[in-house]
Image (cartoon, grey):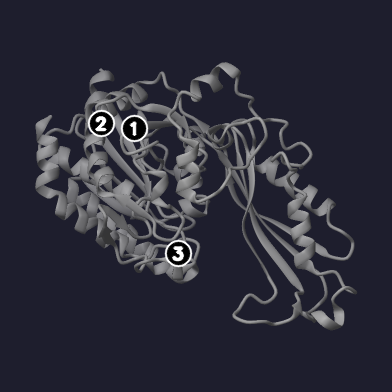
Amino acid sequence: MKFVKNYIEENKDRFLNELFDLIRIPSISSLSENKNDMLRAAEYWKKSMLDAGADKAEVMPSDGNPVVFGEKMIDPKLPTVLVYGHYDVMPVDPIDLWTTAPFDPQVRDGKIFARGADDDKGQAFMHAKAFELMVKTGNLPCNVKFMVEGEEEIGSPSLGKWCEQHKEMLKADIILVSDTGMIAPDIPSITTGLRGLAFMEVKVTGPNRDLHSGLFGGAVANPANVLAKMIASLTDDDGHIIIPGFYDDVLEVSLEERAEMAKAPFNLDEYKKAIDVKEVHGEKGYSSSERTGIRPSLDVNGIWGGYTGEGAKTVLPSVAQAKISMRLVPHQDHHKIAELFEKHFKAIAPDWVKVEVKSLHGGQGYVSPTDMTAYRAADKAYTDTFGKKPVPVRSGGSIPIISTFEQVLDTKSILMGFGLESDAIHSPNENFPLFNFYKGIETIVHFYHHFAEMSK
């Protein structure tokens, strides 16, 4: 399909400029001050869908940020692909670690540097451009619908209900998602599993005000010290999580399947070098790939209390807080895990502090079958464009809404990601290689043609 490469080459600069305009909108869903930016990003997506050739597109209200829906139905007898993406992004802190401004996209060393360059503005926008390519060249082989939300980075709290309310409108044969990654630039992969998530916030309170650490230190419990000890007790030296009942529903992967997973290329020395650590650490008895793909985990995502400004202020803080996430594997229910965590965390609190635990958001894990038509179509698409078969992998990340799609819409998802570990999503200097952006567009077009052909 030479027309695919030709269209991308002829329009690649425009594609990039249009993506940059979307990236420049600071659509951070977790910050209330960016509320207006969420609507601006949604409206930009509506215009992008219409410009690309959608018959209709609209910004639709939800209980939270709006959802953008668009579609082009060429023949109800043909299969329908529902594209899912999100226009919200993570906060940019710490801002001083960015080389350039996070919402001023720059190209350096063949990569786009900006918040959302990969997750998920860059990857989602590939679908808009692949759709445009097929429509404008008269090569769209099936029906296409778009659903782009603005709350994925805060757990998609409104989208499940919104999907319930619009089931008929969202009917499709497969949901196509690009919000995951590849093993390496020359090793394509298809994500066949996602971990679930339970995200908690804890608050430990001691005295009714900050105290002088000289006058009170050693006589009154320090909430920051107590919190640190409580968190440290949640895992043992072997990386095992010490919460009663936590592992009760964990799906144990067979030795045979683990052996198959081990065939995926992985270089431990390069892995350590890329993140600048001397040694890796995790649950005993499992490899690094298994620790993120088939095993649950518990991590502190943020911790604070007392004085954290420049210089010294000798206080014993009144309050210490932390945000803690638990990545879950299939069969673990995030509601149950959140309850187990709260019960345990309160139980281990000493009498000299008060403890509050709040569940912020969560979602179930997901396994994507490798024997469905969409997987076979994706396999052929990657093979066409990269010249080699993609490797099936289970991701350590979470997209909580994917399991909800299956429950509410009764539709499977195929996860065709083009990001790389080095893209630094959620971190300062997030980036996305231009090669992956354009190659992603090309691969998506091939997927449509294979999927339509195989669905006959």
Q: Quadrant of the C terminus?
A: top left
Q: Amino acid at mark 1?
A: Pro
Q: Position of residue 298 (x, y in %)?
A: 65, 46
- Between label 3 and label 1, give the one nearer the viewer: 1
Q: Amino acid at mark 3?
A: Val
Q: Amino acid at mark 2?
A: Phe
Q: CA distance from mark 2 to mark 3?
A: 33 Å
Q: Nearer the viewer, residue 154 or 9?
A: 9
Classify 10 Å Cα crowding around label 3: few (below 14), some (14-19), many (20 and above). many
Residue 304 in the image: above or below residue 235? below
Which of pointers 2 and 3 lies earlier in the amino acid sequence? 3
Could you tell me if the residues under marks 2 and 3 are in contact, i.e. CB atoms within 8 Å? no
Classify 10 Å Cα crowding around label 2: few (below 14), some (14-19), many (20 and above). some
Which of pointers 3 and 1 lies earlier in the amino acid sequence? 3
Residue at 33% from the left image edge and 58% from the top image edge = 42
Q: CA distance from mark 3 to mark 1?
A: 29 Å
- Between label 2 and label 3, give the one nearer the viewer: 2
